[in-house]
Each structure stands twice: as C-alpha cells, then as structure tokens.
Image: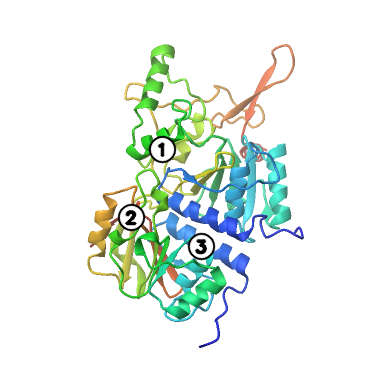
Amino acid sequence: MEAGYNFAYLDEATKRMIRRAILKAVAIPGHQIPFGAREMPLPYGWGTGGIQVTASIIGPEDTLKVIDQGADDTTNAISIRRFFARVADVATTERTAEATIIQTRHRIPEAPLREDQILVYQVPMPEPLFRLEPRIAETKRMHALADYGLMHTKLYEDIARLGRIGTAYNYPVMVNDRYLMSPSPIPAFDNPKMDRMPALQLFGAGREKRIYAVPPYTPVRSLDFEDHPFRAIRAPHACTLCGSAASYLDEVVTNDQGGRVYVCSDTDFCRAEQEKAA
Amino acid sequence: MSALQPGFDEPVLDAQASFRAVLEAMSRPGRIIQITAEAPGPAPLNTAAAAVLLTLADAETPVWSDAGPEVAEWLGFHAGCAFTRAIANARFVLATGEVPALSAFDAGTEEEPQSSATLIIQVESLVAGKGWRLRGPGIEAEHRLDVVGLPGDFVAQWQAQRARFPRGVDVLLCAGDQLAALPRSVTIEES
C-alpha cells in the first residue's frame, strides 16, 4: 500500500461524512443528498463522485471492478482500478461475477448482479430536472412536492414532435414511486436492470456534490405513457465478436468507406460469451 | 473515576467493517447483521451501539444520550463527539433506557429530509423469522423481525411517522453485537 496516505486515500472525517450521507440516501431512495465533495487526484468528470463513494465503503476484503462504458480496459477504468490497488491494496478484477464492488461509468453490466455486490455509479449531473428548471431552489421544491409534471410535459412534447420519446440515455426514472431520479447517462437499454436489482446501487456526483441511492429490490420505473410505453433500445445487430443478439452494442467505424462493426459494450460479457462458444 | 476503556483496535479498518455492517442493515431492513469489530465501551453501551457510534458520530454530529457520563466521556475521547441536551437538535440519539417518542426528534424537512436524526436504540434481543412483517425498499418480499425491549406503542408511532415520508427518523436497533435497521421507508405490520 502506498505510504503516506490513509487507507483508501480519504481521511477518516471525510469518510464519516460521506458514510452518513450514504446511509441517509439509502433510507430515502432516489433523494439527492448534498455532501462535501473533496478534491481528488483526478479532474471532475473522471469519476470523482464515484471514487469518493467507493473509497468510503471499500475494505481490504473487497474485490473491485471498474468499467467505463462497459469496458474494463479503457483509460478511466484502468486508472481508477490502479488507484484503489495502490491506496487501499484491494484485489481488482475484470470479471463481474468476482467483484464485490463495481464502479461504473455509464453502463450496468449485462450479467445480473447479486445481493453481495454493490454498484457505484459515476454521475455527471444528478438533477434530472436541470435542463427544464435551472434553479436548484426550485427543483428542490419540486422534489419535495413530487411535482414532476414538467418532465412528463417534456416527454409528451417529444412524442408530439418526433412520434416517440427522444431520450436514448439518462432516461428519467421514478424510484419507489416517490422520487424522480437521473440514472446517470446509462443507455435506456439498461434502465430495466435497475428495477428490483438484488444489489445495492449508490450514485456519486463529485462536481455537483450529491449522493443518492437505490436500495436492493426497490421498484425503479422508467417514465412513459400508457399509449407510448417505455422501450429499451439496442442496435438491431449481433455482436461481431461473440454473436450475442441480446447485449448492448457499440458501433465501431472500421474505415473511411462506411465500414462498421457492432461489438458488445460490456467487454467481460463478450469475453465470457466467446469462451462459451469456443 | 475508572480508567478509560479503549476504542477500536484498528480505528480505520474497524470503522470500515462496522460501516459496511450498518450499510448492509440499512439496505436490507430487518435483516440481522453481526458486528465484527468490537470496542469495549463502558456499561450500559452494548457492542453494536458502541461500534455504530465510533463509526458515524464525530464533532459535527450532536449526540443526545441517556447512557450517563462514562459513556459520554468514552465517546468524547474516541470519537470526538459533541453532545446536546436539546433532543430536537440531535443528529444521533443513543437510547439505552426508556425510548423517547419518535416525534420528539428532528424529522428533517420536506426539502431536506436527510437532516433528520438517526436513533440508536439498545434492545434486549432481535430474532429473525417471526414477529413483525416488514415491507419496503431493500426487501424482496417480506422480512420478519421480532424485537424485545421497545415501547408497546412503537409500531403505532412508526405508522404515524411513515405517513410523513420523506420526513422521519431512521432507527438502528442494537442487541449485544447484533444490529438491525429500520429506515424510514419501511412499513411495519404487527402479527
């Protein structure tokens, strides 16, 4: 373990403050709790909120997995994994099934999560209403009154203009029928996985200084209308590498003549599927 | 005056392990969780309550306690706790004897329900598989929990505060080295 740092980087007073915020977040599912986010040794937008949540919960017994857009091998994921290996001396893994804590940027793993796992989301903008109402004092009141007519109007206007709801990621959800919540910029494809998930889901926004949570088995409903039900969208292709026709796909441009392939966004899922086929 | 009892053996790692126990309890209301990191606090503090307070309380969180001066001295030394006599100002409440009415504590506001108090109530025993039927977030179908040592009208008080959601206090029940949580989101049905 790196000398000169406390276990998991943060000092104990900061951890206590974050831990208290996490417990209140779990007690009020979907409600955003302000916290005193610290400066971290990486810039805002690179997962400072998720890292602070992970640093406050992680222990020597944990095994950490970090994904960025589903991939374990991207710069952000690798550097966060290395960070915790250095400052907390924890085991790391790329396999979803082996992890006890999974920190994620913008995806939920394809493999179903279990009760003994915790999913930590990196959140750029925790307030689902911010594009519709920029004043925080006003959005706080709307959450207090569960007054979410504005969001329904936005979705209705999408249907009136486009014939469908035009949101493909960061698709707003209702948590336990009370709080409107941003699921972070995961694809709408992943939204149904949040509903009654056996694992605890924690959300950290570093720049915006908010923490929120969805306890296990909590109903999470994507907003929709009776005549325009929510639909999880995926590219209508099979993965070029593993052949999966059910996983969420990334489109990869292969040349400048319009060539493209579709591959699984979840690299661990893709590897497992390829091993199964081999 | 007796000598001061020690706190956690490993303050950093023991607090982490205890926090995960509390988080697990809070995430799965009514499930009984074992506290592994022991800090031998003075009587009447039990193992679970001692671990919870060392893990979560500090100078920023006024504690209201009915546990007497030795416990206050111990918490003041090891956790740097601030104490308050005004029950409505307490962030943490340590109830080892008679449990005050839930409505006496800060329940937060509609806009900031997170500012409410967390109650650490020492009870005689926690038994799973019988007693109350708990439902709500964190519970797949139903958790059963039998608690000995709460006031007779506790469930009625709980139902009264449940109607005020998202306002309300959260409760950690501590019996020996065992812990079970009642976050404000849970509903309790007596059987």
Three-letter amino acid code of the residue under disc 2:
Glu
Q: Chain of mark 3?
A: B
Rendered image quadrant of residue B97: bottom left
Relative side of A275 to B27, left or right: right
- Cα distance in 3D space between marks 3 and 1: 26 Å
Q: Residue at x 57, y 49 (%)?
A: A53
Asked if labels 1 and 2 touch by Cβ distance under 8 angstroms, the answer is no
**Residue under label 2:** B142
Q: Do the residues at pointers 3 and 1 share their chain?
A: no
Q: Is residue A223 left or right of residue A114?
A: left
Q: Residue at x 55, y 86 (%)?
A: B3
- Residue position marked by numbered label 1 in the rendering: A140
Residue A276 appears in view: no
As measured in the structure, the alpha-carbon distance from the residue carrying label 2 to the one carrying label 3 is: 28 Å
Neighbour tally class for label 1: few under 14, some 14-19, many 20 plus, Cα within 10 Å = some
User: With respect to residue A246, does B80 lie above or below?
Assistant: below
